[in-house]
Every structure is written in C-alpha cells, then in structure tokens.
Image (cartoon, rainbow, N blue to C red):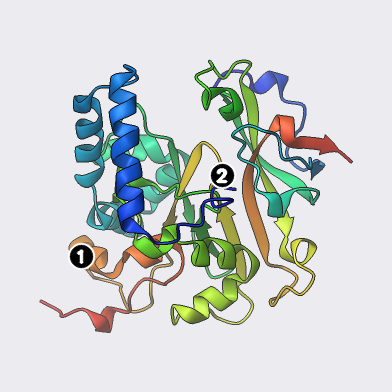
C-alpha cells in the first residue's frame, strides 16, 4: 500500500463526493454523490478499479479513504437519531475540497 | 449501479447461464484457467461462519488478542492459522460496543469477508437489503428482530472498495466463565454482519 505520502486529504478533513456517471466501472454509489462528509481513515493507495475493470494496470494507484457521513445529511427523512452515521470507502479521484 | 438496466431480479437460471458464459470466455481468452476458478471456489467454500465465530470468540476470551485483531486483523487471523488467499481483498474487524452498533453492506454488489466466513447469505446480495440498510438501518434491525439499547449509535459500513468488514459482536451479559467453544456458538452469521446481536447464553444448551 505504497503512496500514503501523496494523499491529498488527511483524517478529519471535510470533503465532498464528486458527482458523475462516467461510462466506465466506478465504485462510488450514486446515493453518496454530492454529499459532504469527513475523512475517517486513510487506508493507503490501491490500484484504480476504473482502470482494472478494463484490463488496465490500475496505475497510478489511488489513495483510498473511509469517509464518514451523518445519516441526517444523506436522507432528508432519516428515521433515527442525529448521531447515526454511515462509513464508505471512496477513492481520492472522487473527493473534492470544500 | 450494478442493477441498472438489467432487471432480471432473482432469475437464477439467467444468472447461472451468465456465469457459465463468463467462465467459458475467461478460460477461452486465457485470463484464468478452469483450475484457478475451481481452486478459488474451493477456498471460499472451505470457510464458513463457524470459522469467524471461532476467531471472534477468541477475541472475547483474550483481551490482548482482541486488541491485535482490531489493530491488524489479517495478522491476528494468521495467529489462529487462517491465511487469506493472495487474491483476497483486505479484511478488517470492527467492534460493536455499548455505544456503537456497526452494520455491514455492499450497496454496489456483494462484497463480503468471504476469505474468513465464506459466502454471504442470499438476502445480503438482494437489492432490498442493500438499498434499505443504508437509508433505514434501524428499520432493517427491526425486521431482523434486533433491539438495541437506548442511546446506541448505529453506524452503517458500505464496503465499496478494497476492504471487507467483519463485525465483532458485543459479548452478551452472563457469559463469564463460558469456554471459547461455548462462546463461539453464540456468534451467528447475522451478528457478524451486524443485522443481529450475539445470542444470549440461555439460547444454547449447556454441556
């Protein structure tokens, strides 16, 4: 998992998930796109699935983060306390500064 | 999203034909051999929820092991003789506590810590679970008959990339003095996904 040093974001940073439906295999579900969350964990760098899926080498590897969201920020009519959260793993090319 | 534009629902015949066609193509194009596919399927089938229960019961019984398991699950699995195949995604263990209840899902497909607990149950792969648990996890808990204490935070973990999540359920009250073997019987597949809790000690016969 080389490449941590090049990660653009650090734990605690606020980020927004990019919006997009590229004509490729991508692993950023649409329900999380456009939402604002916080970096919870930096997992390290992993081959980019958008390249791997088409026989590519997945390079340059993408830093992978676990991003935390408040459920009440994701769903307008969330049925539960405001402390409930959702964690999801997102590659750096899908993250935007706020 | 994986489901877009397919609409075949639970059509088992369609999926088994599709799997056979893909397997034939992968072999024909030299991506892998039939032997590779059989070996991998055998490896997955050699693991079951009982393996996970054994590991997690050891974590209940040995606080030092639990620390190592939560810090570096794969190294801790190895201590008990569980190696992951080279092609396995990373696996990490998250702990359910008095404060936080974690639930695992893969909204995009069916990512699961297969290398430790085998194949996921059928409902885990269905759109109904995958779409509901992210938006209404407490409704899902209710459907599974799972009741949390007041004030417990619910945290859904969507395994959308290179990590798979195995949940260490909260150790139930009244289990002091039980052997690891007995403890393991309390750890169900549902409790390792987070839709359920570990069983109460009364629910298994004492021997």
Element type at mark 1: loop
Q: Which mark is residue B179?
A: 1
Categorize mark 2 by other alpha carbons within 10 Å: few (<14), some (14-19), many (20+). many
Badge nearest the viewer, 1 or 2: 2
Quadrant containing the C terminus of chain A is top right
Residue B27 position in % (x across, y down): 28, 23
Q: Residue at x 79, y 42 (%)?
A: A19
| Residue A67 x %, y % | 69, 46
Residue B90 drawn at (x, y percent): 44, 36
Which residue: 76% across, 40% down?
Answer: A20
Which quadrant of the structure image shows residue B18?
top left
**Is A20 placed above or below B142 here?**
above
Q: Name the image quarter holding the N terminus of chain A.
A: top right
> Residue B101, located in which quarter of the rendered image?
bottom right
Q: Are marks 1 and 2 on the same chain?
A: yes
Q: Position of residue B29 (x, y in %)?
A: 34, 18
| Residue B147 visible to an observer of this rendering | no
Q: Nearer the viewer, residue B177 or B159?
A: B159
Q: Is residue B4 above or below residue B78?
A: below
Kindly identify which residue carries mark 2.
B160
Nearer to us in this view, B24 or B83: B24
Which residue occupies 32% across, 36% down?
B21
B109 displayed left or right of B84: right
The extreme left residue here reads B207
Pointer 1 with pointer 2, Cβ within 8 A? no
Comes first in the chain, label 1 or label 2: 2
Judge by depth and name the residue closer to the eye, B130 or A16.
B130
Asked which secondary structure carries label 2, the reply is: loop
Q: Say which mark, if any, is on residue B128.
A: none
Q: Is residue B169 above or below residue B205?
A: above
Q: Which chain letter goes with mark 1?
A: B
């Amino acid at each position: 998992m080389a490449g941590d040093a090049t990660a653009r974001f650090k734990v605690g940073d606020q980020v927004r998930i990019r919006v997009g439906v590229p004509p490729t295999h991508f692993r950023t579900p649409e329900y999380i796109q456009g939402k604002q969350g916080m970096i919870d964990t930096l997992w390290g760098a992993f081959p980019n699935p958008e390249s791997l899926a088409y026989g590519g080498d997945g390079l340059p590897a993408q830093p992978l983060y676990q991003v935390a969201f408040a459920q009440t920020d994701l769903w307008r009519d969330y049925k539960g306390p405001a402390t409930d959260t959702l964690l999801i793993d997102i590659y750096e090319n899908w993250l935007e500064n706020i | 999203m994986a489901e877009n534009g397919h609409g075949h629902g639970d059509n088992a015949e369609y999926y088994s034909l599709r799997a056979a066609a893909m397997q034939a193509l992968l072999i024909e194009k030299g991506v892998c051999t039939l032997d590779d596919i059989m070996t991998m399927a055998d490896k997955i089938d050699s693991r079951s929820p009982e393996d996970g229960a054994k590991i997690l019961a050891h974590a209940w019984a040995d606080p030092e092991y639990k620390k190592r398991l939560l810090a570096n699950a794969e190294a801790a699995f190895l201590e008990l003789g569980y190696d992951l195949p080279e092609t396995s995604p990373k696996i990490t263990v998250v702990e359910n506590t008095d404060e936080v209840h974690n639930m695992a899902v893969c909204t995009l497909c069916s990512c699961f810590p297969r290398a430790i607990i085998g194949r996921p149950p059928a409902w885990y792969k269905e759109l109904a679970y995958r779409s509901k648990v992210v938006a209404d996890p407490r409704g899902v808990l209710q459907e599974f008959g799972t009741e949390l204490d007041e004030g417990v935070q619910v945290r859904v973990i969507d395994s959308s990339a290179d990590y798979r999540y195995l949940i260490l359920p909260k150790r139930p009250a009244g289990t002091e003095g039980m052997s690891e073997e007995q403890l393991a019987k309390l750890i169900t597949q549902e409790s390792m996904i987070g839709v359920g809790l570990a069983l109460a000690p009364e629910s298994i016969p004492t021997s």
